[in-house]
Image (tube, rainbow, N blue to C red):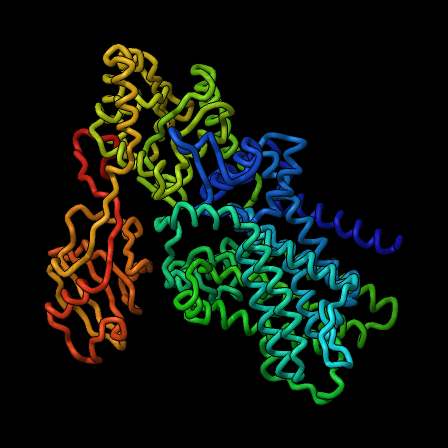
């Protein structure tokens, strides 16, 4: 027990020392978030929302004059990670401190779980620490700074351990008795397996989905290979635990959608996005971007410039050691055959299982692979298959450790040889970590701290000037989540207002497609005089502008109009990026212009969202024409309504209570597209021949099409697309 404790403590200390140098913790300020841009801002917003509101589903400080409800964009799949941060927040209510501590904790947790699994499979303890360091400091962990919840991949080693237990026919979950019955086994390892799977269901939908995939693959592979159903039964039970756990975690969202209906603007994903964010083998083995060696950095930079579909998958690099191990594992599985098939060792069985999972991961994740088929046939919600790289990395590193251990056992005999072996191992570990971590310092640079402090001081000064619970309207309008980038501005930059305040209510953060978002979306289309009066009547106390979202001329135009209208000079941040207008004097005038009864009536009118929505029936009275004949289905079209929104996902088409999906490529029946770029504009729908009764290769007439739509109920739901007056509006062209 003492030796085990020393093993873990020495490993953790070594991990912390490595963190200190790799992450540049010498310059790290725990009160300044380690990332202050992009998805890092949304993560900070979610963490602060959890601290301020008790949990993650509601935030009363965002989406003013309503609030933010996160049910359409469920965060429950990460409940376990939020729970850890909730515990940290008991000691500090500063979101930046909580986020930073959890970020640092992910490294330690990944390291501990890795050496635990390596030790379970009898890997030499020095080799275990070596492998755990490589896995902990993968490019995936270093580069994906904004995706904090993806950095919590510490359960990946543990779920791989459970899968290997199944492959090794370990007596977990179920056993097959002599009476030909399956019996549940409540052993220590069974409980460990169940707990791990339950936790996996609460540490990210991607890790849960990938874990289920590998459990299924190995369950089927071993059941067929050994002609024993029990392998598949064990896998299936653990898959069921993960699936049920995930459903429970996101059940508030499922209930909300059942009551309020599907939000097409947040739920729609293109199946082809699985290609865009797919896994690329070349990226697994190429050096990381910004490599420490200039020749490697240039080589990778040239690839990034010339290759297509380079995005977040750039983080999937395994490093030189991981890349070599990945290729060696593929080669071993494909070409190596164990001569004594009836006496396969435990070690060989582990290698074989790792090989199966490795090649399965490639087949699922690669661009044009089975992941795309899954997205097209089952669900497009899982699209970033490049994230399989974190599983592939563990397969490869464990395989490398097994090979190194074989070399150690076979060739390293004397004390001198052991010392040389360990010295070489240390040098390889040092080189491997340098290779994987690149040349950039990850701690906040002075410029990040300067921007953070400037924003904090500016927003705190606003908070001092206006009463608590005052509503602030933010410009430019940006939808949430995954919104626009006006003028190159970050789509979560408006979250900075909330992040730095304690008592103010901010307009940013209304859920896209719901009332809080529609209200703002339509408000900013009004002439500025009407929009400001509406804000005043509703009760807003100020207007906050991020100049980054406009050109210099546009920002000046809006600010000059607001200065004249509100009769007040704006407050400007130290870096001259943020601007704030108080509405105190203007609000007094508004109250003087209306009676209390009139104000209440105007408020009711302003909060009436129904006037922005419309539902129309697609029947035979429209000018339907034939467009395209495809295998098993046909594509038809009509001249589109003039008030349709340009955003495809703002449109919902319902056929006999079944929702159609947007797909301009029309890869299958029951798809729609609003082709607003055509002249004239067309709305296009694909119809299965079996539904329409039209024969294969038989072109329906216009009358045939009209008859079909008279006999079948199609309805289109959408938000009316109001044209904006470019001269008098909050929102101006980019």
Q: In the image, is 474 to the left or to the right of 732?
A: right
Q: Up-down: is 564 above or below 650? A: above
Q: Quadrant of the C terminus?
A: top left
- Above or below — where is 1 with respect to 697? above
Residue at point 56% right, 67% down? 213
Q: Position of residue 127 (x, y in %)?
A: 75, 63
Residue at point 55%, 36% (across, down): 50
Residue 710 placement: quadrant:
bottom left
Residue 367 relative to residue 245: left or right: left
Looking at the picture, does residue 409 appear above or below residue 65?
Answer: below
Q: Residue at x 55, y 63 (%)?
A: 210
Q: 283 or 662, which is in the foreground?
A: 662
In the rendered picture of this protein, how many numbered marks are placed on residues?
A: 0
Instruction: Residue at 32%, 58% (x, y): give it.
Output: 657
In the depicted view, which residue is nearer to us: 212 or 105? 212
Q: Position of residue 258 (x, y in %)?
A: 43, 50
Q: Position of residue 353 (x, y in %)?
A: 65, 74
- Residue 420 appears left or right of 659: right
Classify 549 as above or below 390.
above
Most foreground residue, 392 or 693: 693
**As rendered, which of 143 and 109 lies closer to the eye?**
109
Where's the N terminus, which quadrant? Answer: bottom right
Q: Is residue 334 visible?
A: yes
């Amino acid at each position: 027990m003492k030796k085990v404790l020393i093993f873990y403590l020495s490993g953790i200390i070594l991990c912390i020392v490595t963190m200190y140098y790799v992450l540049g913790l010498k310059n790290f300020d725990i009160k300044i978030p380690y990332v202050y841009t992009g998805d890092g801002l949304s993560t900070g917003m979610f963490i602060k929302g959890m601290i301020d509101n008790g949990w993650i589903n509601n935030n009363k400080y965002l989406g003013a004059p309503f609030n933010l409800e996160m049910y359409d964009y469920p965060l429950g799949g990460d409940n376990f990670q939020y729970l850890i941060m909730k515990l940290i927040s008991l000691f500090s209510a500063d979101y930046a401190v909580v986020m930073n501590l959890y970020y640092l904790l992910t490294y330690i947790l990944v390291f501990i779980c890795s050496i635990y699994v390596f030790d379970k499979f009898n890997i030499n303890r020095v080799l275990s620490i070596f492998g755990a360091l490589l896995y902990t400091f993968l490019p995936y962990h270093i580069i994906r700074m904004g995706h904090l919840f993806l950095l919590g991949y510490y359960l990946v080693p543990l779920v791989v351990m459970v899968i290997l237990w199944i492959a090794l026919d370990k007596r977990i979950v179920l056993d097959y008795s002599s009476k030909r019955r399956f019996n549940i086994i409540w052993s220590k390892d069974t409980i460990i397996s169940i707990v791990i799977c339950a936790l996996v269901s609460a540490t990210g939908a991607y890790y849960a989905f990938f874990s289920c995939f590998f459990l299924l693959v190995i369950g089927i592979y071993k059941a067929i290979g050994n002609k024993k159903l029990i392998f598949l039964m064990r896998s299936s039970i653990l898959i069921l635990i993960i699936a049920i756990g995930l459903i429970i975690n996101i059940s508030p969202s499922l209930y909300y959608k059942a009551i309020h209906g599907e939000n097409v603007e947040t739920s729609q994903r293109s199946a082809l996005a699985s290609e865009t964010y797919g896994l690329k083998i070349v990226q697994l083995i190429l050096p990381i971007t910004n490599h420490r060696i200039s020749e490697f950095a240039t080589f990778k930079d040239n690839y990034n410039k010339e290759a297509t579909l380079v995005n977040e998958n750039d983080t999937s690099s395994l490093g030189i050691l991981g890349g070599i191990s990945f290729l060696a594992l593929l080669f071993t599985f494909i070409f190596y055959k164990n001569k004594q098939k009836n006496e396969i060792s435990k070690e060989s069985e582990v290698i074989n299982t790792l090989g199966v999972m490795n090649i399965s991961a490639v087949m699922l994740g690669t661009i044009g692979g089975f992941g795309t088929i899954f997205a097209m046939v089952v669900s497009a919600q899982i699209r970033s298959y490049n994230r399989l790289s974190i599983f592939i990395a563990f397969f490869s590193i464990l395989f490398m450790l097994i090979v190194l251990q074989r070399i150690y056992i076979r060739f390293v005999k004397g004390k001198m040889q052991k010392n040389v072996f360990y010295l070489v191992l240390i040098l390889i570990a040092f080189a491997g970590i340098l290779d994987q971590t690149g040349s950039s310092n990850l701690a906040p640079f002075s410029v990040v701290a300067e921007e953070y402090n400037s924003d904090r001081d500016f927003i705190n000064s606003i908070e001092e000037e206006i009463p608590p619970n005052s509503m602030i309207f933010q410009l430019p309008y940006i939808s949430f989540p995954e919104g626009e980038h006006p003028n190159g501005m970050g789509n979560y930059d408006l979250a900075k207002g909330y992040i730095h305040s304690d008592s103010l209510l901010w307009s940013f953060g209304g859920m896209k497609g719901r009332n809080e978002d529609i209200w703002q979306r339509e408000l900013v289309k009004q002439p500025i005089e009407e929009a400001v009066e509406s804000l005043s009547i509703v009760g807003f106390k100020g207007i906050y502008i991020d100049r980054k979202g406009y050109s210099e001329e546009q920002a000046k135009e809006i600010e000059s109009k607001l200065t004249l209208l509100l009769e007040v000079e704006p407050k400007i941040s130290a870096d001259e990026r943020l601007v704030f207008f108080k509405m105190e004097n203007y609000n007094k005038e508004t109250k003087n212009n209306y009676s209390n009864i009139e104000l209440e009536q105007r408020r009711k009118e302003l909060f009436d969202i129904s006037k922005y929505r419309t539902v129309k029936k697609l029947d035979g009275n429209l000018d339907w024409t034939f467009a395209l004949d495809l295998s098993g289905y046909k594509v038809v079209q009509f001249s589109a309504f003039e008030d349709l929104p340009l955003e495809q996902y703002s449109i919902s088409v319902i056929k006999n209570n079944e929702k159609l999906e947007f797909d301009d490529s029309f890869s299958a029946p029951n798809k729609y597209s609003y082709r607003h770029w055509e002249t004239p504009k067309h709305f296009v729908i694909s119809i299965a021949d079996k539904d329409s009764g039209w024969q294969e290769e038989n072109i329906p007439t216009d009358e045939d099409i009209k008859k079909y739509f008279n006999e079948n109920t199609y309805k289109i739901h959408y938000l009316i697309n109001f044209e904006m007056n470019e001269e008098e509006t909050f929102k101006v062209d980019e």
